[in-house]
Image (cartoon, rainbow, N blue to C red):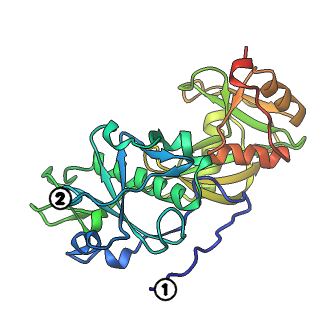
Amino acid sequence: MSIPAPAAFVSPLGLLPLARTAVDRGSERRIAPDLFETIRADAATRVMYFAKGRALVRDSALVLLDPPADGFGDAPVYLGRTLEDAQVPLGSDIVLVTLPEPDPAFAVDGAAWASLRESATELGALDAGLFVEAAAVANWHAVHTHCPRCGAPTVPEQGGWVRRCPEDGSSHFPRTDPAIIVAVTDEQDRILLGSAAAWPGNRYSTLAGFVEPGESLEAAVVREVEEESGVVVHSPQYLGSQPWPFPCSLMLGFTARTANPAARADGVEMSDVRWFSRSELAAAVSSGEITIAGPISIARNLIERWYGGTITEPEAGARP
C-alpha cells in the first residue's frame, strides 16, 4: 500500500500546534458497511481511547492500543490511516473509542490520562492531529444524540462521521463553528488585548468572536472588535487557522489596523481592554501583572508574531 507523505501546510503564522497532522482521514472508506470488521482483523490497527476530554499519553506520545477482542463497542469513530511511521507502522488504521470515564485499567506502564491543553505542545504531528480530531468528533457525538428535526435518537453511520435519524431519514454531520481572532494594532504599532469577563485573574488575549450567519470573515473582524472594544478597524488580513475543539471551533487568525485607538471594554464580554507597546507587554508579563494566552492557542502566536519573538513568562511559583 502506497500512502503519500503529509503535505506541509505552513501558514504565515507558522506551524500552529493544533493545526499539525499526519493522518489520512480516509473519507472514501467510511461508507463501507463492514469497515470496522475489516480493520479489526488487521494486525496494524490501533485504538485511541478517549474519556472526558482526555486520552492516554506516555513519554510525549499518545498510547494507541490493540483492538479489544470483543470489538470496538457501540459507537466507534474511524480517525483514518497514519501518514508517519512512528509508534505504529505507516498506514495503520486508527479507531476512536470513547469511554464514559477515564479508566485507570488502561493507564499502564507509565501512561496517564491527559487533556489536549496539557499535552499538545509535547506531541508530534501524528498524535496532535489524532487528538484534535478525536476531541472534536467526540464532542459532537456527545451533544448530538437526537435528531434536531423530530427529536428521535440518532444512530452513527459512515465510520462515525454521520448520525442518521431512523424516523425521518435525515442525516446529520459534525459541526464546526468559525471564529475570527485578531491582532489589532494602531499607528504606534501597539497591540490591543482584552480580558474577558469570564476569565479568572488578569489574563489578556487578542480579541475574538464567532462569525454570524450570512457574514464574511472580514466583516466579522470589524464587527467583533468594535463590539468588544469600541475600536473601529480596517484592512483585515487573514494569516492562518487552527482547529479549537473546545468544543467545536475553527479559529481564523487575522491582523487589523486602526487610526483611532480610543478603546473601552463593552462590560459584558470584556471586562478590560488595553493597548500595549512591546516593552509594556514584556514588563507586564514578566512581573506577573498579567498573563497571556497559552502556547497552544493561535492567540499566543498572533501576539508573539507582533512582538517579534518569544515572550518569557515567570515560573508559576515566582508569580505574585
Tell me which residue sits at (65%, 53%) in the image.
253
**Residue name at image x 57 percent, y 48 percent:** 60
Name the foreground residue: 186 vs 39. Answer: 39
Residue type pointed to by label 1:
Ser
Q: Local crowd at mark 2 within 10 Å, few (<14), some, or many (≥20)?
A: few
Q: Which mark is residue 2?
A: 1
Q: Quadrant of residue 293?
A: top right
Q: Where does the N terminus fall, quadrant-wise?
A: bottom left
Q: Which mark is residue 151?
A: none
Q: Residues within 10 Å of mark 1 (few under 14, many from 20)?
A: few
Determine whether 214 is above or below 190 in the image.
Answer: below
Tell me how many marks there are: 2
How far apart are the two marked residues, 1 and 2, measured between alpha carbons? 30 Å
> Quick check: 201 left or right of 30?
right
320 with respect to 122 (left or right): right
Which image quadrant: the C terminus? top right
Residue at position x 69%, y 64% in the image: 11
Q: Amino acid at mark 2?
A: Asp
Residue lying at the far bottom in this picture: please name it.
2
Residue 128 image point, x, y percent:
54, 55
Q: Quadrant of residue 286?
A: top right
The residue under the point 72% across, 34% down is 193
In front of the other: 296 or 193: 296
- Identify the residue at the far left of this view: 167
Q: Which residue is mark 2?
A: 70
* Helix, strand or loop for disc 2: loop
Mark 1 or mark 2, whichever is nearer to me: 2
Q: Are marks 1 and 2 in contact (CB under 8 Å)?
A: no
The residue tagged with tag 1: helix, strand or loop? loop
Q: Determine whether 73 is above or below 269 in the image.
A: below
